[in-house]
Amino acid sequence: MTSCSIADRSCEPCSGGTPALTPDQASDLYKELQEGWVLSADSKMISRRFTFKGFAKAVYLTNLCVWLADQEGHHPDLSLGWGYTEVTLTTHEIEGLSENDFVWAAKLDRLLG
Ligand SMILES: C[C@H](O)[C@H](O)[C@H]1CNC2=NC(N)=NC(=O)C2=N1
C-alpha cells in the first residue's frame, strides 16, 4: 500500500524562478503536519519549538536537524538554548514557503515518531 505522505517526497533544488506558495496552498500543506507547527500570519514561514529538560536533548535534536538538512539539501534556521530547539523553515531563494519546507517538516515529524 502507498501512504501518499508528503514525508515520502524529497526536497527539490529550488531556483529563484519558482513562485512562493500562496496562503491557500500553504494552509493545505500545513494540515499534513503534526501538531505543534505554526504557520506565520504572512504565510512566509513555518516553525516549531521543541522543549526539553536540559541542554543535551536540545543539542541532539539540533544535530538531527543538521543531518536531515544535509540529507535533503534544504536548511532550516535553528535556534538552540537550554531546554529548547526552535526550527524555522522558509525558502530563502524565494523569500517565502515552498513545498520543500513542508516536505522537510514532515520528514522531521516522521523521524520523531
Ligand atoms: C542549491 C541549493 O538548493 C540552495 O542553495 C538551497 C540550499 N538550502 C536552502 N535552504 C533553505 N531553507 N532555503 C533555500 O533557499 C535553500 N537553498
Image: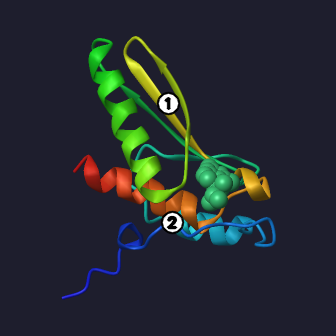
Residue at screen point 48% across, 21% down: 80
Is residue 90 in view? no
Dot 2 or dot 1: first in sequence order is 2
Residue at screen point 36% across, 50% down: 108
In the image shown, does 41 or 50 lie closer to the viewer? 50
Q: Is residue 100 left or right of residue 21?
A: left
Residue denoted by label 2 = 11
Q: Label 2 amino acid?
A: Cys
Task: Give the foreground label among 2 and 1.
Answer: 2
Residue denoted by label 1 = 86
Residue 99: assigned label:
none
Which x, y percent locates residue 33? 43, 58
Q: Label 1 amino acid?
A: Glu
Q: Secondary structure at mark 1?
A: strand
Q: Is residue 103 above or below residue 50?
A: below
User: The N terminus appears in which quarter of the rendering?
Assistant: bottom left
Residue at screen point 35% across, 23% down: 58
Residue at screen point 46% across, 58% down: 72
Q: Is residue 14 above or below residue 72?
A: below
Q: Secondary structure at mark 2?
A: loop
Q: Is residue 39 left or right of residue 5?
A: right
**How far apart are the two marked residues, 2 and 1, measured between alpha carbons?**
20 Å
Which x, y percent locates residue 64? 34, 39
Which x, y percent locates residue 88? 57, 40
Is residue 26 in view? yes
